Image (cartoon, rainbow, N blue to C red):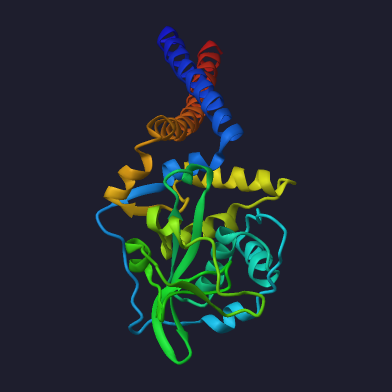
Amino acid sequence: MKAVIRRHISVVNSLIVLLSSLTLVIGGYFGLTSPVAFQKSNAIKAVDSLSKLSATNAKLLDVRLAISSIPYKLEGGPVNDVKPVDKYRKTIEEGKGNCSNMSFGMSYRLIQEDIDFQIVQILNPVGFLEGNGHTVLNVPYHLDGEARVGIVDMVEGGVPMNGSDFIDIEDLQRGGLSDFKVKPLNASKDLTSPYYDDLVDQGVIGVIDRDEVEGYFRFLSTVYIPLGNKRLEKMFYDGVSMVLGVFPTIYVDRSDYDLLFSKYPVRRFSAICLLWSIRGLAILLIYRILFATVVSLSNYGRDRRNVAVAN
């Protein structure tokens, strides 16, 4: 029996060493090159059609009120705060961050106000694994007495238009915005934007639904403990949420999925291997600890019985 247990432990230990080595090597590669590539490769999923929002009987965002009060900063870089409420304060209340930061920051407020929404990512097929692209919101809103579901660009401080028409997610999918402009809703913003020309025509539209964001925010709010470095915290908690399956899924049309990853099969495969190596390693470590505990308790009980018999 002891020989069987020793062989079993030896096999488990060998698997732990193997998965640890894979995790260190592949994880080191993504950590040094592009953590975003690990996230995108695992978060993007193919669907037959993207979900849609409706303005019928929906609670509407007062988009002018929401954007006009943002004190946009000209400089500052990305916001790496992990807690959703902190990200909201830094982005919407203090005006810091990039397009993704501001879209996720505003999402916190939309959840608090029970307004439905989607986070929309315009993914650049050439550099999306490095984070190249643009992020906006798709949300039911009212503006100048009219209600609609459409795109709201938080970092540009307004609602995108093509001529006299407000842009919705279908317009982004079609592309060809020949008469593009942004209707500014903040005094510091203007009509222009660098994101809607070639990017929209060549890019892939990815959608994150509200329930995905809400679950992700709930997880971060529950488990967050400061680690002393915002960037490290962002990488760590996004990694943990990815391993546990609560990182938001980015849905794309099935044909677009093939377009995105056709040039990056090795990086995608490596990212998926890393994710499952971490998950497998975690399961094996828990199993190893539980198995050792059970064996120790069994040996302790047997020793007690032997002592009792001897006496």
- Please give the name of the residue rendered at 61% of the width and 59% of the height, measured from the top-left corner: 98
- Please give the name of the residue rendered at 70% of the width and 73% of the height, measured from the top-left corner: 71
Pick the front one: 2 or 219: 219
Q: Is residue 241 above or below residue 13?
A: below
Q: Where does residue 255 sit, x and y in percent of width and height?
A: 27, 48
Taking the image as shown, residue 243 lies to the left or right of residue 149, namely right
**Count of labels in the image:** 0
Query: In which quadrant of the rendered image does the C terminus lie?
Result: top right
Q: Residue furthest bottom?
A: 145
- Please give the name of the residue rendered at 68% of the width and 55% of the height, measured from the top-left corner: 77
| Residue 178: quadrant of the picture | bottom left
Q: Where does residue 94 sit, x and y in percent of width and height?
A: 71, 69
Taking the image as shown, residue 220 lies to the left or right of residue 231, namely left
Taking the image as shown, residue 169 lies to the left or right of residue 62, namely left
Q: Is residue 228 above or below residue 137?
A: above
Q: Residue furthest left?
A: 48
Query: In which quadrant of the rendered image does the N terminus lie?
Result: top left
Pick the front one: 279 or 179: 179
Q: Where does residue 117 sit, x and y in percent of width and height?
A: 43, 70
Q: Residue furthest front?
A: 178
Pick the front one: 242 or 166: 166
Q: Where does residue 152 sit, x and y in percent of width and height?
A: 49, 72
- Please give the name of the residue rendered at 63% of the width and 66% of the height, measured from the top-left corner: 88
Q: Is residue 39 above or below residue 33?
A: below
Q: Residue furthest top?
A: 3
Pick the front one: 24 or 308: 24
